[in-house]
Amino acid sequence: MKVHHLVVTSHVSDQTLDSISKTTHLRILFPSSRNSFCSLSNKAVNDTVSKLTVLRVLNLSWCKTFKELPKKFGDLKHLHSLDLSNSLVERLPESVSKLYNLQILNLSSCQKLTQLPDDMHLLINLWHLDIAGCYKMEKMPRQIGKLKGLQTLTTFIVGEDGGARVRELGELSELRGNISLQNLENVANGEDTSKARFANKKKLEELTFSWRRDTEDPEHDKPVVEKLLSGVELKRLNIIGYGGMEFPNCFRNPNTISSIVSIKLERYRHSQSLPELGELPSLKTLHIKQLDGVVRVSKEFYRTKGNFASLESLSFSSMSAWKEWNSTKVKDHKVYPKLQELCISDCDGTPVLHHLELGKCEKTQEVPQTVGCNGEALERSGRKNETCVLPHSSGSSNSFLTKLQSTTLTHLEIKNCQVLESFPLCSFPNFTHLDLVACENLKDIKVVYGKPLPLGSLSIGGCPNFISFRGHRLKVCNSNSLTVEDYEKLEKLPTCPNL
């Protein structure tokens, strides 16, 4: 019997693999799980593969003992697909460049891989090359631009010496999906980036620009980004490690990047302000992380008439110098009319309000006008069906809770708030869900007799000093869940007629 297609079960031994090598007509060798090849020796793999000369598809993903292919691997002339992802392979033999029928090469998360074969450009039928997560690679082989049928190229690494220059991407007009350009500090000049011709790659949806270190010239990065983005229509843009003092001019003209729905800005070392993004008509998601030079978010963020009309998710994190958020000078229209989620985390400049999330804001009318470093200036009003999360609070909780009392907030979760000793549930008539988590000094929840609360669920966990519900009985109209965990000091539960 001739076996053409073999799916291998988990934990194959060297002996089993040796028996597989006798099926000389095998065309497809595939693991059924990530554990299938995890215990094989490198020698057993190479001996077997060398004998399967008519293989079309070979998958050795998650083979953690596998470090190198046999030198004559290029003899597998019929191979169409090779998957070495999540293996410990360190380099590929030069003979791989002789696999003229190879169409798919997956090397993603090969964290030991240092380089690709010099003659990769000979793989004229290759249309999928995945090297995402190959962190030890420092350059791409020259002439990779000759792979004109390439549709997927997850990562392009600009090398210092002897590697491919970014202009090599100019001929790859069929690229689609996403591509990450890394080590952009090695770009020679603006002319080089112009020849990458990203404007001609109409099927690209996402671009990531990344710098590993600063360039000697502080003006280097700005023209690089401007020319790479010139005429490009994208859905998602990520810029990481940008070292320019000013943002590229394309951010100042919303027409140049009007199609973008998601932007991620991370690890800007010298910028002291945020780019002018408020007028981008399609922007739905904006994540800003580790812009350590930014002290305040002010009217420049919104531009002249910007109000982030389509923005649904806004996130700030690791902003070590941030002290103020001010949008009060944005005139004639309310900002963030469609915002559903707002996250502020690990920002040393906002010690009281470290993390705030807003969700399901179906009729959002207004977002925080000013967030000062002590949280005192936080103002909120007119929101429906909201969720607020406040973890890691180290300052006074009273001012923050006082601000929330005038809102229509319905969902509240407070985590790791060590200054919270008493929660005034009686002051929040619109609550439907309340979660108090890891508030070690919480002792009681104040409830009073009066109009029934619409509370649907109440959960208290990780609050070892919680004693009681203080006041009259807890009268609610919709309650179906009351959870209290870690209650060593709890004296009594409230009287809840509906439970």
Image (spheres, grey):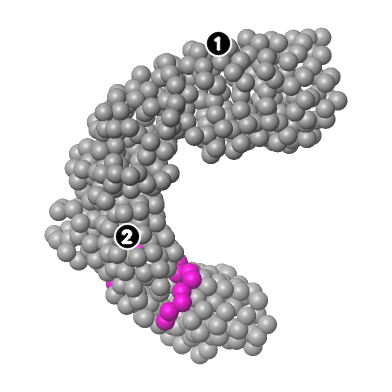
Residue at horizontal 73 percent and vertical 18 percent from the top:
49
Residue at horizontal 33 percent and vertical 48 percent from the top:
243
Residue at disc 2, secondary structure: loop
Q: Is residue 84 magenta?
A: no
Q: Is residue 395 magenta?
A: yes
Residue at horizontal 55 percent and vertical 21 percent from the top:
117
Rendered image: mark on residue 100: 1
- Amino acid at circle 2: Gly
Q: Above or below — where is 326 with respect to 107?
A: below
Q: Position of residue 75 (x, y in %)?
A: 66, 11
Asked if residue 371 lies left or right of residue 433, the reply is left
Residue placed most toward the observer, 407 or 173: 173
Seen as rendered, the residue at the extreme bottom is: 471
Rendered image: mark on residue 293: 2
Residue at disc 1, secondary structure: loop
Rendered image: mark on residue 189: none
Residue placed most toward the observer, 166 or 414: 166
Residue placed most toward the observer, 468 or 37: 37
Count of numbered tags: 2
Q: Above or below — where is 117 with respect to 67?
A: above
Q: Quadrant of residue 204?
A: top left
Neighbours of disc 2 within 10 Å: few (<14), some (14-19), many (20+): some
Asked if residue 473 lies left or right of residue 45, the reply is left
Magenta stretch: give its range.
379-396
Asked if residue 377 lies left or right of residue 5, the reply is left
Q: Position of residue 229 (x, y in %)?
A: 28, 35
- Amino acid at circle 1: Tyr
Can you see residue 336? no
